[in-house]
Amino acid sequence: MSVKYVLYIIVTIITIWSLDSININAIFKKNKNIQARVFYFLLALSLIYLVTNCLYDLCETAIIS
């Protein structure tokens, strides 16, 4: 298994755990639960992708230098 896949799994767990502390429903209007869940899902995917690629690129450049 590639290092990047393991990094994705670790970052996914940390991201979901950290996003769980935010009350997303308080930000949205009443009766907009579906939109809040979609936003939460897209936010989680974006953070997972960005953090994983950032950490992977940092490791790649540190090894090369």
Image (cartoon, rainbow, N blue to C red):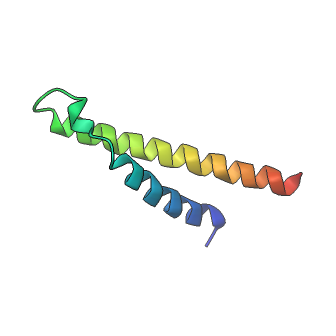
- The answer to whether residue 43 is above or below residue 4 is above
- The answer to whether residue 18 is above or below residue 22 is below
Query: Which of these two is toward me, 21 or 5?
Result: 21
Query: Which of these two is toward me, 11 or 18?
Result: 18
View extreme (right): residue: 65
Q: Is residue 34 left or right of residue 50?
A: left
Residue 31 x, y percent position in the rendering: 10, 32
Residue at 62% in and 48% down: 53
Q: Is residue 24 left or right of residue 43?
A: left
View extreme (bottom): residue: 1
Residue at 50% in and 63% down: 9
Residue 21 x, y percent position in the rendering: 33, 47
Residue 34 x, y percent position in the rendering: 19, 39
Residue 3, quarter of picture:
bottom right
Residue at 41% in and 50% down: 18
Residue at 80% in and 50% down: 61
Residue 38 x, y percent position in the rendering: 28, 40
View extreme (front): residue: 21
- Labels in figure, total: 0
View extreme (top): residue: 29
- The answer to whether residue 12 is above or below residue 24 is below
Q: Is residue 29 left or right of residue 57?
A: left
Quadrant in which the N terminus appears: bottom right
